[in-house]
Structure formats: structure tokens, C-alpha cells
Image: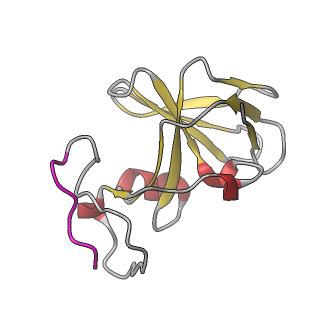
Amino acid sequence: MSRKTGRCLCGAVTYEYEGPENWCAHCHCESCRRNTASPFTTFVGVPNGAYRFTGKTPKVYESSPGVRRHFCDRCGTPIAYEADRFPDEIHFYAAGLDDPSLIEPKGHVHCAEMLPWVKLADRLPRYAHSSSGDAQPTQNE
């Protein structure tokens, strides 16, 4: 089984997980953009029970009802996202992995909120909202 590790900028918060990811996708929602101060972010969904924090436990901020964002209280790095609507997994920020090249995004979610100046050339499926909530992906631009 493959073990992947990740950490925050200062190295205080570290984590690892074993086994396959549930999914990996780019998120364009406004809330994630604000949380990361970037035009979009990439998440990897990891099953509960497959991960553990190996360093300092991250702090948690409830950004909206039922949504918790984990971060390092020393350097501020976003670590993970949890939501009541996804009770069986945690979503780690892919760029926080020690080797993000080991994972590959399979689509874009919340494209209805994508910034108009973001122009992406990949041919991945794009969903207006979440991939689980949309029947069909939107057109690639």
C-alpha cells in the first residue's frame, strides 16, 4: 500500500495516509478561494480511518454551518476540509502533500463560481457544482 505524507509551511502540522484516495479534483468555489487566497484549490478525498496527524494537531475553524477547515495555528497553512455532507472522508489540500505529483486530479467542481479570467487548457470534466450533485459535466472551454 502507498503511504503519502504532508505538512504545513512551518512543519508543525504533519499528516499521513495509507491506501487509495477516494477522488482528487480542483475546486473553484468562492469559500475555498478565500480560504487559500488563490483562484482555485485542489483537494484529495481520503477515507476516515486511513489518515492520521503525526505532528501538531491542526486548529479548526467552522467556516459555515457543518463545514470545518483545519489549519496550522503557527504559520496559517490550510491543511484540510471536513463537512457534514461528506461524513466518511476528509479532504486534504493536494499542494500540502510532500509529493503532490503522486496524485492526479480527475475534474473541476463548482465551476459555476470559477473566476472569468481563469483559462484552463486541460480536458478534465467540469461540474457546475459538485460532481456528486451534477448529472452531467459542463462543457470544457
Question: Magenta residues: mostly which secondary structure?
Answer: loop
The region drawn magenta spans 134-141
- Observer-nearest of 87 and 132: 132
Instruction: Decide: is 13 above or below 130.
Output: above
Q: Residue 18 location, x and y as percent? A: 69, 29
- Quadrant containing the N terminus is top right
Q: Residue 124 location, x and y as percent? A: 38, 65
Residue at 39% from the left image edge and 81% from the top image edge: 119
- Observer-nearest of 125 and 6: 125
Q: Quadrant of residue 54?
A: top right
- Quadrant containing the C terminus is bottom left
- Observer-nearest of 113 and 64: 113
Magenta stretch containing residue 17, yes or no?
Answer: no
Q: Residue furthest front?
A: 1
How is the model colour-coded? secondary structure
Q: Residue 13 location, x and y as percent? A: 77, 35
Left or right of residue 17, residue 128 in this image: left
Residue at 22% from the left image edge and 59% from the top image edge: 137
Q: Quadrant of residue 111?
A: bottom left
Left or right of residue 61, residue 66 in this image: left
Q: Residue 66 location, x and y as percent? A: 36, 26
